[in-house]
Image (spheres, helix red, strand yellow):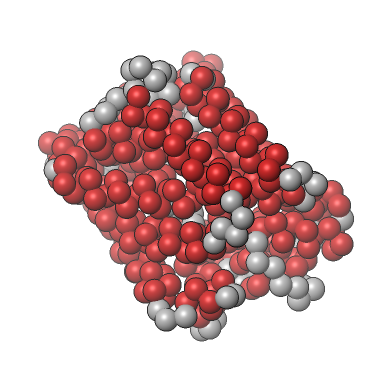
Amino acid sequence: MFTGISITKLFKPIRKVNRKNIFLFLAILGPGIITANVDNDAGGITTYSLAGAHYGYTLLWAMIPTMIALVVIQEMCARMGAVTGKGLSDLIRESFGVKVTFYVMIALLLTNMGNSVSEFAGIAASLELFGISKYVSVPISAVLVWLLVVKGSYKVVEKVFLVACMVYIAYPVAAFMAGPQWGTVLKATVVPSFRMDSGYLITLIGVVGTTIAPWMQFYQQSAVVEKGITIDQYSFSRMDVMIGCLMAIVVAFFIVVACAATINLQGLKVETAADAALALKPLVGEYASSLFAFGLFNASLFAACILPLSTSYYVCEGMGWESGIDKDFRQAPQFFWLFTIIIVISALTILLPDVPLIMIMFISQVVNGTVLPFVLIFMLLLINDKSLMGNHTNGLVFNFIAWITVVVMIGLTLLMTVDLLSPGAVGRIFGF
């Protein structure tokens, strides 16, 4: 009899709601919520802002299937961490060899370097709206990020990250202040709407692709392992994953709504999330504009911590080096030096004049789109390995949903990559 994880078990609630289970859930809480929410970073907020500003409510329907895909993928890597006690890079190296792992690590490192630079660009842009120069905001933010991770313990760092997740409430508040027609919003959410122009297609791919990134699987599984979550506690960790995914999609939903109800309605054009925050000021008011800008700063600073941290985790795991926030420079030198180098390079890049940030983001997106399908296939091969997962492999229905998710993601990412590599794509998409 097949005893793997079924789709009904995934959504099965915890049997007893009592004080003990509540306290246990609060102790487990963290990896799922943090990982899903940090993906609403500077690049994600920019993508959602542009979707609402350029195409109104017509892309809201993509939120529900995207959330399902996100839950499926993040649940699998959290389960692997709880069952095996190992990170995803560890498992890839042990199952597929050092050579394969090395190439995957290089691709992910290049991608995350580009993404980390964009996070510091988000910090600079958001605080410039409050009159703070990037030559002040970026160095201070870089030092704070470094001190938090290098000098803090895992428990302290996780608590700070969880507080940062709460700041995303700024976007639902900004959306309600925009006064959208909620009947129209509801209809657009449940009724798919397609447009055949390439801009709409690229934006749709961006909305899906920015929600599910390769670094997320590596970071969440590593966080589950470092927190010491076992399969006996996994029902609580599963709830953490589902709550985190729901929160992330709700935030994305309201960013689209806020921009659709104001910027799109007025027929304005914006190119970045900072432009969107600035455009909201005369349309909705200074408070909504400030909330939007502060949300961008929080998301950028939050991701500036997580992205270099996730990179350090998976590279060190893949190479067999010591890793973990609870260690120090002597115990895990490669882990902390890699984290430090990424922070320094990313911050210095933003401070250089005439840096081609759009080109950096362009290259990282291409690499991201190329790597993601391979990561998802590795995950599915690993999670269906009974010698590795025992009775905790995917069930038949869950496997079907997972593979459909992979096929769709492969199709979307390949389509995005092909389009980005076509002649004149950079100028067509980014306006030069």
The tally of labels here is: 0
Q: Nearer the viewer, residue 88 or 188?
A: 88
Q: Nearer the viewer, residue 198 or 391?
A: 198
Task: Inspect this view and state whether residue 31 appears.
Answer: no
> Residue sitting at 33 percent across and 61 percent down?
370
In which quadrant will I find the C terminus? Answer: bottom right
Q: Nearer the viewer, residue 426 or 400?
A: 426
Give the percent coordinates (x, y) of residue 108. 35, 49
**Residue 261 vertical position relative to residue 213 in the rendered view, above or below:** below
> Residue sitting at 64 percent across and 45 percent down?
123
Quadrant position of residue 156: top right
**Residue 2 vertical position relative to residue 321 in the rendered view, above or below:** below
* View extreme (front): residue: 353
> Residue sitting at 25 percent across and 37 percent down?
318
Give the percent coordinates (x, y) of residue 423. 42, 81
Give the percent coordinates (x, y) of residue 258. 72, 59
Side of 167 where 428 appears, left or right: left
> Residue sitting at 53 percent across and 29 percent down?
146
Task: Inspect this view and state whether residue 321 appears.
Answer: yes
Q: Nearer the viewer, residue 269 or 203?
A: 269
Side of 215 where 284 appears, left or right: right
In which quadrant will I find the N terminus? Answer: top left
**Residue 123 vertical position relative to residue 338 in the rendered view, above or below:** below
